[in-house]
Image (cartoon, coloured by chain):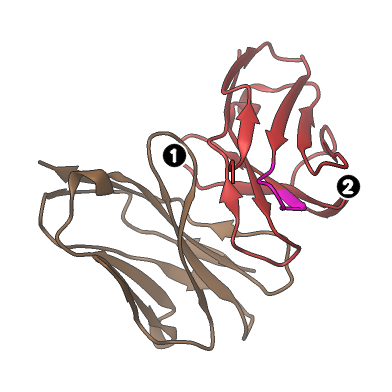
Amino acid sequence: AQKVTQAQTEISVVEKEDVTLDCVYETRDTTYYLFWYKQPPSGELVFLIRRNSFDEQNEISGRYSWNFQKSTSSFNFTITASQVVDSAVYFCATSRPRDDKIIFGKGTRLHILP
Amino acid sequence: ETGVTQSPTHLIKTRGQQVTLRCSSQSGHNTVSWYQQALGQGPQFIFQYYREEENGRGNFPPRFSGLQFPNYSSELNVNALELDDSALYLCASSFFLGDYGYTFGSGTRLTVV
């Protein structure tokens, strides 16, 4: 069965600090997808990234970067030079190709303090 | 693009009642999924509709049912409400089946008292 564990329930950092959100996943599939979503106080889930299991290249998008390591079943998310607007709940998730659902972790609530 | 619109935004119901939540999918999207997000938890998949047919279902009892209309908008119906049904209900649409570029709505906050 698929499972996503986000061990950090809540993190607080001061603005401009770097912060890493951890994600560990479990799956028996050789092909799968991994995701990160952001949920601001307004409630909607904002898609940040999707990675395929066969693509372990790290990705950088502006202040965001993702580190995918199959050896440790981890897909960690780093925000560089954090800003107050980054305050939100962040969800790591996984899915299988042609499956109909996304399996979410419990989320990490991130507070960026001014 | 107008995004995904859900209504109502908030709702309070009494245990045992029935509720209907509505979702207008993003223009051009033919697949709609519903998720339940309890407080402090991640979203859990309820079911998905593709071209007006249920395409998959999560671990939810039959009193959770849905519809998708020809314009691809959707409804989630919950009968015999229980206190544990209190949650944020999220609707997500995508261009096609298997497309994970979901656009999520802001959800309906349901409180059962």
Residue found 69% across the figure and 35% down from its top:
B23
Residue, disc 2: B52
Report the quarter where the N terminus of chain A lies: bottom right
Q: Is residue B25 left or right of residue B56?
A: left
Residue found 72% across the figure and 30% down from its top:
B22
At label 1, the amino acid type is Gly
Q: Secondary structure at mark 2?
A: loop
Q: Is residue B34 left or right of residue A113?
A: right
**Which numbered mark, 2 or 1, is in the foreground of this view?**
2
Please count the marks in the image: 2
Viewer can see residue B80: yes
Residue B87, by quadrant, is top right
Q: Is residue B109 magenta?
A: no
Residue B43: % across, % down = 56, 46
Judging from the image, what is the letter of the chain drawn in brown?
A
Taking A39 as reference, is A24 above or below it? below
Report the quarter where the C terminus of chain A lies: top left
Q: Is residue B18 left or right of residue A108?
A: right
Majority secondary structure of magenta residues: loop
Residue B76: % across, % down = 76, 33
At label 2, the amino acid type is Glu
Residue A63: % across, % down = 24, 65
Q: Which residues lie in the magenta part?
A: B25-32
Front-most of residues B14 and B35: B35
Looking at the rendered structure, which numbered label has been put on residue B97?
none
Tell which subunit mark 1 falls on: B
Residue, disc 1: B40
Residue B85, by quadrant, is top right
Tell me what hue chain B is rendered in. Answer: red
